[in-house]
Amino acid sequence: MSFVGPSGVGKTSYAKRLIEKYNFVAPTAATTRQQRSDDDGHYKYVTESTFFKMVNSGAFLEWDRYSNYCYGTLLRSVEEIMSSSHRRGVILDLTPNGCRKVKEVIPHTIVIALLPDDPNWLLERLMSRNSQPPEEIQTRENLLMGYLDEINMLVNMLACKKVYASFSPGSWDGTFETIEKIVFES
């Protein structure tokens, strides 16, 4: 099961709810960015040189560059989760390019495109998180509209399920229920 969507839209929060409620597991990912205070422990931090050595050795299920940093899902971590019988399954947080790669390898994977119902709240959230340097927030802001267009094209191309998220706390449970229906009715 995979989420694709822009930074700050809530992919990590909804993934955590699926992990807690249904025993999904997030695999370890490698990244070239610095650790943030809100990271959830599923990252391995490496230099760009090490990252590309890992790419060349086939260490990733998928990888991509986003906002000047590289991110990749470690294939071994996914394989370990999938071979474990006491887990519901793997939950991935992907870029559109990463999503295409995963769908090529695992065509039956469920992909949920999590999009903001209004991009303005997402921009405000990115600026207020204070977990990233201002230049990284600016880069993400500059990428947002093009990224949303790219995700919408991906939705049509790969028949992804689209879910709109709101920043209103009163809507979070309803959004999660929509996600649950997609995951368990697919």
Image (tube, rainbow, N blue to C red):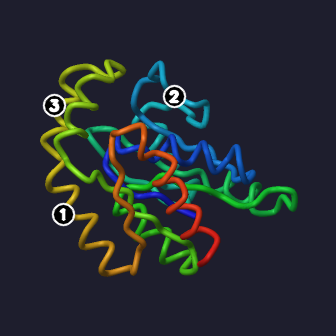
Q: Secondary structure at mark 3?
A: helix
Of 104 and 37, nearer the camera is: 37
Does the rendering let one see residue 140? no
Quadrant housing the N terminus = bottom right
Q: Which residue is mark 2?
A: 39
Of 105 and 11, nearer the camera is: 11
The three-letter code of the residue at mark 3 reads Gln
| Left/right of residue 32 with respect to residue 157 in the rendered view | right
Name the quadrant containing residue 20. Answer: top right
Say the numbered circle drawn on residue 138: 3
Q: Residue 56: x, y in percent? A: 49, 55
First in sequence: mark 1 or mark 3?
Answer: 3
Q: Residue 155: x, y in percent? A: 33, 73
Of 55 and 133, nearer the camera is: 133
Name the quadrant containing residue 168. Answer: top left
The three-letter code of the residue at mark 1 reads Asp
In the depicted structure, whether residue 185 falls above or below residue 165: below
* Residue at position x 20%, y 36% in the image: 123
* Residue at position x 33%, y 23% in the image: 129
